[in-house]
Image: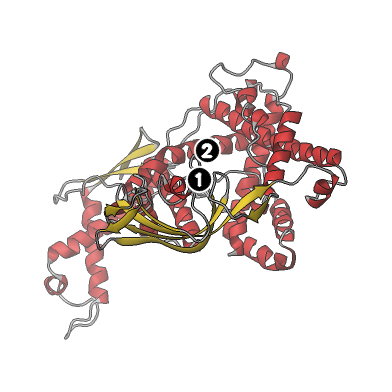
Amino acid sequence: MKVTAEKIPESRVLLRIEIPPEQVSDAIEKTYRDLSRRLRIPGFRPGKAPRALVERYVGGDETVQQEGIDRLIDESYRRALRDTDTHPIAEPDLSERPEFHPGEPLVIQATVAVAPTVELGDYQTIRMPAVQVEPTWEQVNLLVDEIRESNAEWTPVQRGIQKGDHAVIDVLGVAGTVPTLFGPTGEALLQTEGGKEVYNVKEHEQEVNPEGPVEFAPGFDEELIGLIGGSEKRFGLTLPADFREADLANKSIVFTVKVQGVKEKHLPAIDDEFAKRVGGGDTVEQLREAVRQQLQDRMQREARMAYEDALVEAVVNRSQIEIPEVMIERQIDSEIDDLKSDLQREKIGWQEYLASRSRSEEALRADYREPAIRTLRSYLVLREIARREGIEVRPEEVQEQIDQTAAQFGRASSIIRERLSTREQRERIESRIFYRKTVQRLAEIAQQEASEGASAAPETPTAEAAASETTTSTEKPAEEVTPAQAAGAPETAGSLAPTTEETNANG
């Protein structure tokens, strides 16, 4: 048997296998003998029936011949992999079935996807000093104001609704109908019959803000201005173009709204009592210091994440890698499977989700393609750096991470520990630890003195640029770090596909 292996684009190998005619004949003859021994033909002991009778019993000599060739192809392919030291990551692509001509060699061509080879750039010369971040007192004051807003009291009032009030309302919305008679103030009095009930909520409380996010339909909040408790109003609007049900987008909808009550906002004074009530200390000064530390922690966490992203991007940009299509498809499959799992926990059907996004599954897969390629490139490059740097993860490190995560669930810790101890979950945790240790090693290299090596390439995002949004962010208070975030690494890829968070083990 002759075998040649040729590397072709997209991390594939083209195997050409030539099998001598006598080997093909032997394989067909062996198949006949095997069939003869297995068949139970009346009047003959196993293996003793004439060949013509055996062939007729299984559907003709072509059936015996084809099964013999199929067996030979499988055996020859596996031997060719060993002989050429080829390690496939998927089933081979036999572009066209080999034709058999008695007395001639059987030629097989198989395209095999293999693990991509990563050509690392000179990551040792990347220099990227860490960025120190610190909140301003203006940012602190803004966050204190947000805390004050979140602790506002809403007091019932006997007047018409104004912007910024909370309205307690019953809402009935019927789409696909058209107002046909209007009252003196423009309200819809009659409408065409039929339509679809889209909204039917009782005692719904919402903040009235015509310039704010749309909850029911554009213009809904404007219609509430001036209404008093106990009043009722009917009016027509148009659903937005991106409405969750595509068949109702841009359709007319008639609302019937009954006002149950009106509430106005009263902000608490920022004093020592307020500080004690929100858990910020005994004085306003202690509250501001606690808020400053909270902002500091959040900004440092965000700056570290931005720094790591910029550093990994710099390393990946210096590397060369061709990712086989089968790995990309597997990565997309994994991410969509994770999405389906999330939707299932939220009791949302897959088709319902696609309809709400006005997307087909094919279009959604196309959306996932570029992110999947970026994830794979980062994963494969970092895996190669880990190999070069001799980075390993010991079993006790995985167990320590499991114990730390489980401990955060109190009385449920034993259940969480058990669920995180499966082989699949341990592999996922191990991959995260690998990521964290590899990025830490890259940071050690990048933060050496600039005089020790060249600066980062001009096209590489700098740590300052990556963290620029962090130093000005004042939109919301710091979030608590979840047990899954404590694992500290992104999802991996390929056979170690992107995973759901460890906390999903909680059900």
267 or 141, nearer to the observer:
267
Return the residue at label 1: 493
Which residue appears at 64% of the width and 28% of the height? 467
Residue 469: x and y in percent read 61, 29
**30, above or below 385, in the image:** below
Helix, strand or loop at label 2? It is: helix
Question: Quadrant of the image for the N terminus?
Answer: top left
Which residue appears at 58% of the width and 65% of the height? 507
Return the residue at label 2: 380
Residue 304: x and y in percent read 68, 34
Residue 411: x and y in percent read 74, 68
> Residue at the front extreme?
184
- Residue kind at label 1, given as amino acid type: Ala
Colouring style:
secondary structure
Residue 391: x and y in percent read 67, 39
Query: Is any part of residue 391 visible from this angle?
Result: no
> Residue at the bottom extreme?
43
What is the distance, in whole Å, between disc 1 and disc 2 at their CAs? Answer: 8 Å
**367, above or below 171, in the image:** above
Which residue appears at 73% of the width and 58% of the height? 408
Q: Are marks 1 and 2 in contact (CB under 8 Å)?
A: yes
Q: Residues within 10 Å of mark 1 (few under 14, many from 20)?
A: many
